[in-house]
Image (cartoon, rainbow, N blue to C red):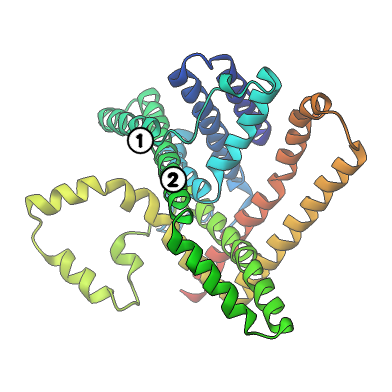
């Protein structure tokens, strides 16, 4: 249910953005609102699995918050979801889907399209406005106002990443056009020419596999960490994160010092980082509590499930066969809904992995 609601809201936001293309601010806000709705439904989808997880439901676990309301879950979980998804290509993926919506509405008239991700100044200003709105709404405890504050936080995170990626693309475009970059490419080609053909081919293939290997290993671990944030894991302060490391004595001494006005201001400015984003880092340590076997099993099962779902998607596309552009744009929403429903299977895997990590922690404790 949550997957379907999230997909429908995201799709509605994309098409509403195209209808508001004449007003850039309204079109961008509609686009981002659809994304926030989808991510909020994803957070609540993870939260809906809680009754079936025995480890999470243990009442004697001091590090899990007692049954949270959905507003509390969104307040603590939406920001990290937006951040991790943005790092994982959310901005580009959503913009590609918006491009399809614009293409179905305006055809090849690109000058009418609703959102331009290359306008880093616009997204930076939008991020600043969202941060200010979030700060003004923070003091209210009313559920409706808290939901607006959560939405403002999500807009701030997404717009910040959009501006950052736009600036990075500009810098990369400038860098790759310099003579020094071309010299580096020539030097790399010359160095590879010294290697035997078999070694050179192996080296190039290995470099090509590195991003896929990192993604295969890191994505399930990040997902398990996000489920930990949703389920209320709270033992994640900076001092707890440094336990057992060389940074522990330093963090202990800093915690014993008297807090001055500058430190107090720094703590206020980094409150969201410490309270909402450090949980993701700490939950990674929880995953490790399941041992090497547990971590490797999670990565292997996630890779197999991802591969299986990709095969199913390819089989559906092959079954539909080649179509015209208009027909392809027509069936894409239904195809996307099927993919969204199938995407609930990995979420169940990650929630189960978090639950097993809690069980392993209780045994070792």
Left or right placement of residue 176 versus residue 260 in this view? right
The answer to whether residue 134 is seen in the rendering is yes
How many residues crowd mark 2 within 10 Å: few (<14), some (14–19), many (20+)?
A: few
Q: Which mark is residue 170?
A: 2
Residue 205: x and y in percent read 69, 72
Q: Mark 2 or mark 1, which is nearer to you? A: 2
**Residue at 52% across / 74% down in the picture?**
187
Vertical comparison of 333 with 52: above or below: above
Relative side of 162 to 186, left or right: left
For the N terminus, the quadrant is top right
> Could you say where residue 36 lies in the image, as x and y percent from the top left?
51, 32
Identify the secondary structure beneath mark 1. helix
Give the CA distance from mark 2 to mark 1.
Answer: 15 Å
Q: Residue at horizontal 50%, vertical 50%?
A: 87
Q: Position of residue 47 (x, y in %)?
A: 56, 43
Q: Which mark is residue 89?
A: none
Q: Is residue 231 left or right of residue 328?
A: left
**Lower position in the chain sequence, tag 2 or tag 1:** 1
Question: What number of labels is visible?
Answer: 2
Residue 48 picture quarter: top right
Q: Which residue is mark 1?
A: 124
Residue sitting nearer the eye, 173 or 309: 173
Residue 2 percent location from the top left of the image:
63, 34
């Amino acid at each position: 249910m949550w997957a379907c609601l999230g997909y429908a809201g995201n799709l509605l936001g994309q098409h509403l953005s195209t209808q508001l293309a004449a007003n850039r601010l309204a079109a961008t806000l509609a686009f981002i609102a659809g994304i926030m709705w989808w991510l909020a439904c994803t957070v609540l989808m993870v939260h809906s699995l809680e009754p079936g997880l025995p480890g999470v439901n243990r009442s004697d676990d001091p590090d899990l918050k007692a049954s949270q309301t959905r507003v509390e879950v969104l307040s603590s979980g939406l920001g990290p979801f937006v951040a991790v998804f943005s790092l994982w290509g959310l901005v580009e993926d959503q913009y590609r889907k918006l491009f399809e919506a614009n293409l179905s509405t305006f055809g090849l008239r690109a000058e009418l399209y609703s959102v331009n991700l290359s306008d880093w100044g616009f997204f930076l200003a939008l991020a600043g406005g969202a941060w200010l709105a979030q700060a003004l709404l923070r003091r209210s405890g009313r559920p409706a106002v808290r939901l607006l504050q959560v939405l403002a936080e999500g807009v701030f995170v997404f717009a910040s990443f959009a501006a950052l990626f736009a600036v990075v693309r500009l810098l990369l475009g400038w860098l790759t056009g310099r003579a020094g970059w071309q010299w580096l490419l020539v030097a790399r080609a010359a160095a590879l020419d010294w290697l035997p053909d078999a070694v050179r081919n192996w080296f190039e293939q290995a470099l090509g596999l590195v991003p896929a290997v990192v993604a295969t290993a890191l994505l399930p671990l990040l997902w398990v960490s996000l489920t930990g944030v949703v389920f209320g894991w709270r033992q994640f302060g900076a001092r707890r994160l440094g336990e057992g490391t060389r940074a522990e004595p330093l963090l202990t001494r800093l915690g014993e010092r008297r807090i001055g006005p500058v430190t107090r201001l720094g703590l206020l400015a980094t409150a969201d980082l410490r309270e909402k984003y450090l949980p993701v880092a700490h939950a990674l340590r929880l995953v490790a509590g399941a041992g090497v076997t547990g971590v490797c099993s999670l990565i292997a099962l996630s890779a197999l499930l991802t591969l299986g779902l990709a095969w199913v998607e390819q089989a559906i596309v092959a079954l539909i066969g080649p179509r015209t552009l208009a027909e392809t744009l027509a069936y894409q929403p239904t195809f996307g809904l099927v993919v969204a429903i199938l995407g609930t299977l990995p979420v169940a895997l990650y929630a189960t992995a978090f639950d097993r990590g809690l069980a392993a922690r209780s045994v070792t404790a």
